[in-house]
Image (tube, rainbow, N blue to C red):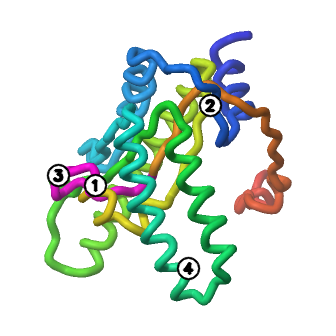
Amino acid sequence: MNSQENILETIRARRSIRRYLEKPVPREWIEKILDAARWAPSAHNRQPWRFAVIERAETKHALASAMGEKLRADLQRDGAAPEVIEKEAARSYQRITRAPIVIVVCVSMRDMDVYHDTRRKKAEYLMATQSVAMAVQNLLLAAHALGLGACWMCAPLFVPDTVREVLQLDADWEPQALITVGYAGEQKAKERVSLDLRAKFLDADKRG
């Protein structure tokens, strides 16, 4: 299999893994997937991504517990049944605490361009967050290529201040996602809708 075929197969074979083996992940492998993440394209090449790596059980517990309390409060305001609230909170807690490695992905606007009008300010922020999303995809694909499982969770978007406070992150680090990483403890299948339902070749009828 040549390099092009290998990349395409990696993309197709990647899965979102939520259960992991109780097996430590070498630090050098975490550094490799973070290195892959930083080679993603970014707006103005400003590389606005930031990564906070969590390995200790105590830190995972503190983060999961704090996020769980916020989730409970949100669901209570939504009028969810108590059993539903506890089920969702428990699931979130387990996903975070049972992962060997947790990577909190943040965006920083520190090096991005500064505008004073709302239109361009919004566009600049979107460019930064899109850059971070591309870095996350690199990270997920690199993890799979190394034989690791990983899962992208967006929960920090709902409680960025809580995540920043628990982890004592710099003020400009805005939590965007949480990536769990480890050796896969499950097998997953996935499907995609047909390409023609999601893409249009706008000039298809204009060819000579």
Of tags 3 and 4, the one toward the viewer is 4
Determine whether, in the image, residue 15 is placed left or right of residue 39: right
First in sequence, mark 3 or 4: give its number. 4
First in sequence, mark 1 or 2: give its number. 2
Determine whether, in the image, residue 95 is placed left or right of residue 131: right
Q: What's the residue type where badge 3 is placed?
A: Asp
Q: CA distance from mark 1 to mark 3?
A: 11 Å
Q: CA distance from mark 4 to mark 1?
A: 21 Å
The crowd level at tag 3 (other Cα within 10 Å; few <14, some 14-19, many 20+) is few
Q: Residue furthest top?
A: 1
Looking at the image, is 196 positioned above or below residue 19?
Answer: below
Q: SS for tag 3?
A: loop
**Image coords of residue 14 (percent x, y):** 68, 34
Q: SS for tag 1?
A: helix
Q: What's the residue type where badge 2 is placed?
A: Gly
Which quadrant, please, contains the N terminus? top right
| Residue drawn at point x = 51 percent, y = 74 percent | 72
Determine whether, in the image, residue 38 is placed left or right of residue 165: right
Q: Which residues are magenta?
A: 166-177
Q: SS for tag 4?
A: helix
Q: Label 1, on which residue?
A: 166
First in sequence, mark 4 or 1: give its number. 4
**Image coords of residue 93 (percent x, y):** 53, 53
Q: CA distance from mark 2 to mark 4?
A: 29 Å
| Residue drawn at point x = 64 percent, y = 24 percent | 7
Q: SS for tag 2?
A: strand
Q: Label 4, on which residue?
A: 75
Q: CA distance from mark 1 to mark 2?
A: 25 Å
The crowd level at tag 2 (other Cα within 10 Å; few <14, some 14-19, many 20+) is many
Q: Quadrant of residue 173?
A: bottom left
Q: Label 3, on which residue?
A: 170
